Amino acid sequence: MKIVKRQLLRTTLAVAFAAIAAPLPALAQKYPDKPIRLVVPFAAGGGTDIIARDMAPKLSEMLGQPVVIDNRGGAGGNIGSDLVAKAPADGYTILFGSNTLSINAALYKNLGFDPVKSFEPIGMVATAPLVLVTNAELPIDSVGKLIAEAKAKPGTMNWATPGNGTPHHLAEELFNKMTGANLTLVQYKGGGPAINDLLGKHTQASVLTLSSVKPFIQSGKLRAIGVATPTRTALMPDVPTIAEAGVPNYRAELWYGLFAPASTPQPIVQALNTALNKVLNDAQVKQRFLDQGYEPKAGSATQLKDLLAEDMARSAKLIAEAGIKPD
């Protein structure tokens, strides 16, 4: 009788422990069972929005649920990021983030969220190569000539800067710091106005995304003299990196990744990462990205986490040294 009771007790305990352990796997197995909101923290029509919309249909297909774009622009991306940071950690509200997260951490004193503690990285999406361009009518066809001209005629050379505190702005500040060229930064409200004044020779150079300047390079109105990526980009293999063109160790990137609110269960994060990497390895999605001037970057959540931490340290150092303040 005692043996039977002991066996009954063991069985009861086993069932109880199984019941306690069941909810999380069950949650992961049924996820997702409703539409997912993908928050883009910038206005519709911009580069971030375009790449998110290129990716969303295939991600919907992989997850078996609609992925709905929700544009929440404002405050340099902080409004949309804050919304996701405070959303339920259930995998149904995720952020289409970029390295504005790492920049804003150093630029703003009171974000209302922490780029590291408030989010669970899901995975990288892509990089957008930044290109150093000059007006093609100017006799500046190399990085060396740009530096020499700026040093020979101090105060006469200007950067067209598409927004204070943007990755492009930091790339130009870094160039000034590393070369001593000290081109004057002229701030514009977006890439369009910056390109217009560069075309009109009101400014002489700019660091902009390849996607925004590619048509002008192809038409011969702008000249690409260097890419800011660590290695040459396959999208412009004949253009040298700024580092190999005379500024050793120069590097500036614009990257995109997906983030979930902190404490999102890891099985859900893994499910999203798996679906995302399948999307990024899809031939049609890859080609759409490349056609738009973006390089797809499949990878792990840990890789995105490490990249964010590295970029935050680099951005904070540059912002402090250059004395950059928010508008």
Image: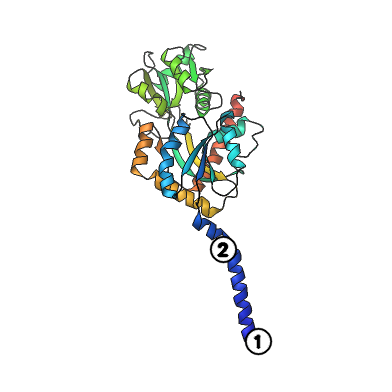
Foreground residue, 171 or 71? 71
Residue type of the residue flagged with mark 2: Ala
**Residue 81 appearing in the image:** yes
> Is residue 245 at least partly visible in the picture?
no
At x 61% / y 34%, what residue is drawn?
Answer: 105
Identify the mark at residue 2; answer none if there is no mark.
1
Colour pattern of the rendering: rainbow
Which residue sits at x=38%, y=36%? Answer: 289
Can you say which quadrant of the picture contains the C terminus? top right
**Classed neighbour count for the residue bearing mark 2: other residues with Cα under 10 Å, few (<14), some (14–19), many (≥20):** few
Is the N terminus in the top left, top right, bottom left or bottom right quadrant?
bottom right
Q: Residue at x 52, y 55 (%)?
A: 267
Vertical placement of 211 versus 181: above or below? below
Judging depth in this view, the residue of 297 and 74 nearest the camera is: 74
Residue 142 appears at what percent x and percent y?
39, 21
User: Disc 2 marks which residue?
Assistant: 22
Q: Within 10 angstroms of label 1, few (less than 14), some, or many (20 or more) residues? A: few
- Indicate the position of residue 134 as horizontal and vertical percent values: 41, 18
**Label 2 SS:** loop
209 lies above or below 257 = above
Please provide percent x and percent y for residue 240: 37, 28
Q: Amino acid at mark 1?
A: Lys
